[in-house]
Amino acid sequence: MLSRTADHLFWMSRYTERAENTARMLNVHHETALLPQSAAVSRHGWMGVLSLSELLPAYAQRHGEITPQGVMEFMVLDDENPSSIVACLRAARENARAVRGTLTTEVWETLNQTWLEISRLRRSGAFERDPGEFFEWVKFRSHLSRGVTLGTMLQDESFQFLRLGTFLERADNTARLLDVKFHAVQSDFFGTASEKDQEYDFYHWAAILRSVSGFEVYRKVYRDVITPERVAELLMLRQDMPRSLHHCMAEVENILRVVGANPQGETQRQAGRLRADLHYGRIEEILATGLHAFLTQFLDRVNQLGAHISRDFLVTTDA
């Protein structure tokens, strides 16, 4: 396969996944913002969304004061923010158009229709009327894109690069979502918290689980009250959880093996080490050494892995 074709497929799936995960991250903050909290706590939470998405300087330059409405509009509708939902869906469609002959008609029509529909929703003010419903629509279109890809594409190298982009992006965004959420909660949830704090935190953890379609999975796996430790374990170390870090890195490692990565090469080595750390990790050890430090290091390593994948297989482009 030509590296340019692989590059377009890789980034097409990454941008689609990024739009979905941005919708998930904003939706959980939109929901938790409805809970009683001070203005300072609310502002800190929205600042965390921007800083961990590496968008705080860009936002400050364009909008100045951090407000929920300003952050939401910046990360959803701003054409000049390359990580906004609108910009991601446009980039996904442009990458798909560049490799139109490699995709099935159904895959192309799904992505093209998504772009046409979000343009219509934007003009109609659907996001301003009901942000929650808009975020659900973004998630649905991403699910539809993946389903059509799985159901119609020949499972050759093109298909593998689509999946590679999806799981690498999902690992990055799940780690960011976890980091944002654990920073946002103010009570000492790993120590002794008051009954009021515990009740307050329950709604936050339930919201983050629902944001990654993990609430019912959590109940099935643990059959107990929601605790921060178990939320972290589910979304980091459980390989059978589709959006966990462990599941994503296992898929990335397997895909690299399929597309012919050198088993002794640096790309395969980094993917294997990331998976091994998650496979043999224990949540107690991670929390003891610091969850934020672990997730920050994980994000750095995922970015390095992405750079090696670009070097080995793709045309070098900016994210």
Image (cartoon, rainbow, N blue to C red):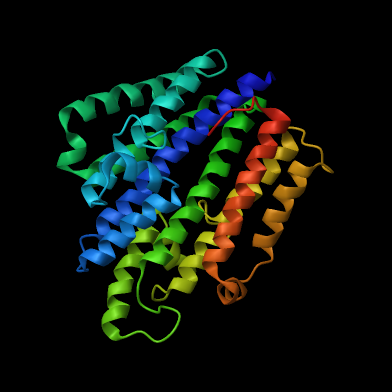
Residue 189 in the image: above or below residue 155: below
Residue 296, image x, y percentages: 56, 58
Residue 103, image x, y percentages: 53, 19
Any part of residue 156 in sight: no
Residue 216, image x, y percentages: 39, 61
Furthest-right residue in view?
Answer: 264
| Front-most of residues 317 and 34 | 317
Residue sitting at x 21%, y 47%: 69
Residue sitting at x 65%, y 50%: 250
Dividing the picture into quadrants, the one containing residue 289 is: bottom right
Report whether 75 appears left or right of 91.
left
Furthest-top residue in view?
Answer: 101
Residue sitting at x 34%, y 43%: 59
Residue 122 in the image: above or below residue 55: above
Any part of residue 310 in sight: yes
Report whether 94 appears left or right of 193.
right
Report whether 282 appears left or right of 223.
right
Dividing the picture into quadrants, the one containing residue 109 is: top left
On the rendered image, what quadrant is the N terminus found in?
A: top right
| Front-most of residues 28 and 259 | 28
Report whether 136 appears left or right of 164.
left
Dividing the picture into quadrants, the one containing residue 78 is: top left
Residue 261 in the image: above or below residue 117: below
Residue 263, image x, y percentages: 82, 42
Residue sitting at x 24%, y 45%: 70
Please count the marks in the image.
0
Residue 161 in the image: above or below residue 220: above
